[in-house]
Image (cartoon, rainbow, N blue to C red):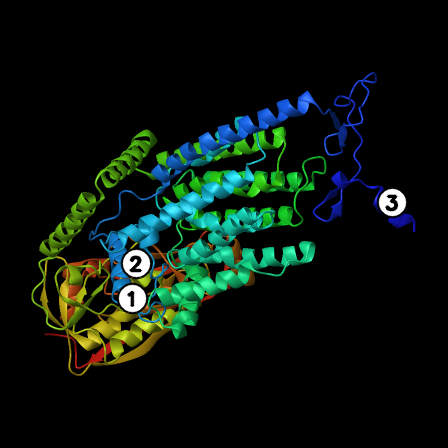
């Protein structure tokens, strides 16, 4: 009986989102003077502890509120124009024979040709990769522009929706500060839809919730361009549904919509429904092994400082968000908003951390560029007060300043030149496209055809009837030259992160659908041993193909009617500790090296949180010189050719002709050891199982 009387005594202003608000006493500095008498029409605001008078004051407040709304409405188009100008890729990527532009084109052609991703083509991007890479094709570029405009516009509208209660004095600087970071490698706005959808879905009103559903749909589409978007959305959206079911008893909707849109996008891309598990499984496998195979230590002398700055800024954001979430004296928030915002902030920071500081190079610039937008869209729903917004603005500006420092650190030109070049390219492309879209699309199409013709002239391939592939090189060469292209599933061996993925490439070269021709050269990334990338394929190449000719850049290998038989005889098998030398057998033969060193439990935890410790293979040559090479664990376990040492085309041709004894005898390996980073001692289960074997072919290698 007492509880019911108490409940009825509460006024309507004390009830917010189904919860009874706390009775907060007025602050002495904000309370009305004792002589002020409250009239019958006055109402008390319990949330601020102030008394509000009716009459003419209400009219002035209404006029001021209307003026503020008009001012915000006037500023919104300016912010939207700035966001679209900076974030939308007005200057798309055209074909080139570099490694990155080449896979841009290969994935784009795979989508146009109906290739099944996850089975026939496996990479860290999906069939809609052109939304991320901005690779140009006349039929696809308008869709890429539309998607980027939608994402940018929806993101800005969502941020403005969260800012609708703020004064213009905060509205404008926060919006501009979030636009300051310059997109470099990839537009980090594409990461925001799932992170924005969660807090927006907790708000009341059809407009906010409709916008949240649109962001979920855009996140599902973006997952087929950049798998990091899926990795951000997959844990966050179910968590939001769980929170809202717990706090507001609302049925889950975000996760089912995301799953439905994933299926719809998969089918819309021309992919069979049965390949969806393969696409998700292989993408997850590539993401899980990314930190062990393609990690980079960062720039010498500044790497750990840059990582420490990012972690410190992330900690400040998380602590600030937790402080804002615990505040009780500010405006009321819908139930579940605080947890949804903190979860989105944590997931977003973790995604940016992995994006920028596992392969610690120019990727770090994109990570810094994502922090201001992430902070804005996840902390504003917590409705910070003046001090909270000042802290948020300071963090955003600090992240923007650190991005400029990263531009100076990771790019060859000073950051003012880099920023000016990026902005000039954006403004020029936007001006051309908006002034005459038809002429600009025609110009870009002509440039695309011209670049493809230039690639064909650059490599000047002979007539190769049938289908071919490129081993360690830009696969764009075959289609640019008008030749049949039959790429292996993993077009670059360095992205292979599991033995099962590597096995798919072996099956491709052993099956009935193997290429008729191979262009083969020695090349590697990240200062690895020359035979490491696609090294597990070398015995199959030597067994199944004969040397048919050469170009200035490649050996031309023709498929044999009957592959040679390959035998492997173990010569040395030892358990090798870190920094311990092992002798290499001294004989003129093909020596095959396998190093099986698996992560420990601590290493797996470190790999999840950041990456595995880096490993190097140190090789002492016959001339006494010691060289150091990056050692990716998965590729090392599959094996690669240790001797003879094959650093270039001359030695590779001698190998294909069977002239093993003539290949760089002074650089032949004599002994080797494994060296790791500081955490390698605990990150791996030492000792490593090292096996050196001799390869033999029947019939022997030769012309």
Tell us which disc is closer to us: 2 or 3: 3
Mark 1 highlights which residue? Answer: 535
Real-space CA distance between mark 2 and mark 1, rounded to the nearest whole angstrom: 10 Å
Mark 2, Cα crowd under 10 Å, few <14 / some 14-19 / many 20+, is many
Q: Where does the C terminus fall, quadrant-wise? A: bottom left
Quadrant in which residue 123 is drawn: bottom left
Q: Going from the N terminus, do you reach mark 1 or mark 3 first? A: 3
* Residue 277 spot, x, y in % from top left: 43, 71
Q: Is residue 609 above or below residue 373?
A: below
SS at circle 2 = loop
Nearer the observer, 495 or 430: 430
Residue 1 in the figure: left or right of residue 97: right
Residue 432 sits in which quadrant? top left
Say which residue label 3 marks: 6
* Residue with the mark numbered 2: 529
Looking at the image, is 513 positioned above or below residue 670? Answer: below
């Amino acid at each position: 009986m007492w509880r019911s009387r108490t409940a009825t005594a509460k006024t309507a202003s004390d009830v917010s989102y189904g919860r009874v608000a706390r009775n907060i006493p007025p602050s002495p500095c904000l309370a009305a003077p004792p002589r002020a008498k409250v009239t019958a029409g006055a109402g008390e605001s319990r949330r601020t502890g102030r008394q509000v008078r009716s009459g003419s004051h209400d009219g002035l407040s209404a006029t001021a509120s209307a003026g503020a709304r008009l001012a915000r409405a006037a500023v919104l188009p300016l912010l939207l124009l700035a966001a679209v100008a900076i974030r939308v890729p007005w200057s798309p990527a055209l074909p080139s024979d570099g490694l990155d532009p080449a896979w841009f084109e290969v994935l784009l052609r795979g989508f146009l040709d109906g290739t099944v991703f996850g089975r026939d083509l496996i990479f860290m991007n999906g069939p809609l990769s052109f939304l991320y890479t901005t690779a140009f094709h006349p039929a696809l570029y308008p869709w890429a522009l539309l998607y980027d405009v939608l994402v940018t516009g929806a993101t800005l509208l969502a941020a403005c929706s969260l800012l609708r209660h703020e004064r213009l004095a905060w509205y404008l600087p926060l919006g501009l500060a979030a636009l300051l970071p310059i997109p470099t490698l990839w537009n980090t706005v594409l990461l925001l839809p799932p992170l924005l959808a969660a807090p927006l879905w907790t708000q009341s009103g059809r407009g906010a919730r409709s916008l949240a559903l649109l962001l979920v749909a855009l996140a599902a589409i973006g997952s087929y361009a950049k798998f990091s978007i899926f990795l951000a959305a997959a844990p966050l959206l179910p968590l939001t549904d769980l929170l809202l079911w717990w706090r507001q008893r609302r049925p889950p909707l975000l996760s089912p919509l995301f799953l439905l849109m994933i299926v719809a996008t998969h089918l819309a891309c021309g992919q069979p429904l049965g390949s969806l598990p393969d696409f998700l499984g292989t993408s997850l496998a590539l993401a899980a092994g990314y930190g062990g195979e393609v990690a980079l230590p960062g720039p010498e002398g500044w790497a750990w400082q840059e990582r420490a700055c990012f972690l410190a800024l992330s900690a400040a954001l998380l602590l600030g968000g937790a402080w804002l979430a615990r505040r009780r004296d500010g405006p009321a928030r819908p139930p579940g908003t605080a947890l949804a915002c903190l979860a989105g902030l944590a997931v977003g920071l973790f995604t940016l951390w992995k994006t920028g500081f596992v392969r610690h190079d120019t990727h770090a610039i994109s990570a810094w560029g994502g922090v201001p937008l992430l902070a804005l869209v996840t902390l504003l729903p917590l409705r910070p007060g003046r001090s909270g917004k000042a802290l948020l603005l300071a963090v955003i500006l600090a992240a923007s300043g650190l991005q400029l420092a990263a531009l100076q650190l990771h790019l060859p030109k000073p950051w003012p030149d880099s920023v000016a070049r990026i902005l000039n390219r954006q403004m020029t492309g936007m001006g051309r496209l908006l002034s005459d879209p038809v002429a600009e699309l025609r110009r870009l199409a002509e440039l695309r055809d011209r670049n493809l013709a230039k690639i064909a002239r650059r490599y000047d391939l002979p007539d190769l009837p049938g289908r071919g592939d490129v081993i360690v090189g830009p696969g764009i060469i075959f289609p640019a030259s008008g030749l049949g292209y039959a790429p292996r599933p993993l077009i670059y061996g360095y992205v292979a992160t599991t033995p099962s993925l590597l096995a798919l490439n072996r099956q491709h070269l052993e099956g009935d659908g193997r290429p008729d021709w191979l262009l083969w050269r020695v090349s590697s990334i990240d200062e690895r041993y020359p035979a490491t990338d696609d090294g597990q394929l070398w015995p199959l190449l030597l067994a199944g193909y004969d040397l048919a000719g050469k170009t200035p850049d490649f050996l031309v290998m023709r498929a044999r009617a009957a592959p040679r038989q390959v035998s492997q005889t173990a010569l040395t098998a030892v358990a090798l500790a870190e920094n311990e030398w092992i002798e290499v057998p001294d004989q003129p033969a093909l020596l095959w090296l396998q190093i099986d060193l698996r992560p420990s439990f601590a290493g797996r935890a470190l790999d999840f949180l950041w990456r595995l410790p880096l490993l190097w293979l140190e090789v002492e040559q016959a001339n006494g010189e010691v060289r150091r090479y990056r050692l990716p664990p998965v590729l090392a376990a599959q094996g690669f050719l240790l001797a003879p040492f094959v650093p270039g085309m001359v030695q590779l041709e001698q190998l294909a002709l069977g002239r093993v004894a003539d290949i760089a005898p002074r650089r032949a390996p004599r002994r080797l050891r494994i060296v790791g980073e500081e955490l390698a001692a605990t990150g791996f289960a030492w000792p490593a199982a090292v096996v050196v074997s001799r390869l033999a072919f029947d019939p022997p290698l030769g012309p």
